[in-house]
Amino acid sequence: MREVDIIGVGMTRFGKHLETSFMDLATLPILEAMKDGGIRPAEIEAGFCSYALAGDLHGVITGGQTIFWQAGISRIPIINVENACCSGSSALYLAWTGVASGLYDVALVVGAEKMVVPNFGLLGGGDTELDILEGLVTPASFAMRAQRHMLQYGTTAEQLAQVAVKNRLHAGLNPLSQFREPITVEDVLNAPMIADPLTRLSCCPNADGAAAVILCAGTRAKHYRSDPIRLAASVLRTGSYQNPLDLVPWETDYRTCKAAYEQAGLGPEDLDGAECHDAFTIAEIMHYEAMGLCPAGEGGRLVESGATRLGGRIPVNTSGGLLSKGHPVGATGVAQVVEGVRQLRGEAGERQIPDAKVFLAQCMGGDKDADARTCTVNVLTR
């Protein structure tokens, strides 16, 4: 397998884009990424487009073809990808395999979603599954995991709330984040209850947004820019229904992180920063443990210590995370990598991690029973 580098990135602001169509929204970061990478449309050899909900919400079919055509890219393989919250990072994984294997020298990934629509409803695993019909929608599932983590490890509601407070602090430094006004632990605890112990400020908001990344064979990357970022590992794993029903932890989360560290030849001690799938406050705490940032059960105490905020030992979700940056599902996994690239290039402005050299982006989708349906981990280095 060849070494793979990232030569260009682009991203819209996450939030409400009521006057912008889905196709136009997705085209914008492609144009930005090509300009960033100094590359022409004719040099893109393959395209991967991710969206999870656009088919149902906007009637989108083969949206990637239209989006790439609008950006001046045609007559190449274009693949549309849906994999729940990992849609974007799964598209990135497919692009990485294509470039690493030698099938393509340059591939472009774009993820997009428009979720700010009337009567959106709750995300779930599908309206034909019995547990969904009985009420096990996504907030309820994460609330059960939070209750179990609190019972088993002594994690507190205040520690859960500190995740939201930290990520809002980071979002205040990111002009592309949806919500930037500071919040307090009291604000989180006193917000309307969604599923005990998760209040509204414990849950990520719907958002519109798009992000793009261009991958290039390592041998050619410096033809485009002098400071390419190495995609040192890209791992995609699927969960299992064979595990005993244990709400803590997600076994697939641990397994995917372990495989990514092995592929990159690095460990958690080498990380300078990370983005993780903080769809709910409890999720970030559990992902700390899977990423090896602390022992199992210590995630609540880790965030309480300040280690995961800017200036701490290992800043997590410097972009603001899903909780404050927003969660346009098909774009999230790509946007996490965009944040990593900008951190490693030293382009993150006020939220910059000093001298960052290694960054991890973790995403998880389709929380289900004892495990997750899918999980991705990408490791970036410079």
Image: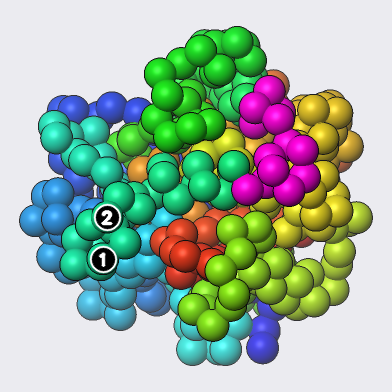
Q: Quadrant of the C terminus?
A: bottom right
Q: Colour mode?
A: rainbow
The residue positioned 53% from the left and 31% from the top of the image is 197
Q: Secondary structure at mark 1?
A: helix
Q: Quadrant of the N terminus?
A: bottom right
Q: Is residue 322 left or right of residue 49?
A: right
Queried whether the magenta region covers residue 198, the answer comes back as no
The percent coordinates of residue 288 (x first, y second) are: 73, 49
The residue positioned 20% from the left and 53% from the top of the image is 54
Count the labels in the image. Answer: 2
Q: Secondary structure at mark 2?
A: loop
Dividing the picture into quadrants, the one containing residue 132 is: bottom left
The secondary structure that dominates the magenta segment is helix
Q: Which residue matches tag 1?
A: 130
Residue 371 in sight: yes
Queried whether the magenta region covers residue 151, the answer comes back as yes
Q: Is residue 111 left or right of residue 129?
A: right
Q: Which residue matches tag 2?
A: 134
The percent coordinates of residue 183 (x first, y second) are: 57, 12
Dividing the picture into quadrants, the one containing residue 317 is: top right
The percent coordinates of residue 43 (x first, y second) are: 41, 70
Q: Amino acid at mark 1?
A: Leu
The residue positioned 25% from the left and 67% from the top of the image is 129
Marks 1/2 in contact by CB < 8 Å: the verdict is yes
Q: Is residue 7 left or right of residue 191?
A: right
Residue bounds of the magenta highlight: 148-160
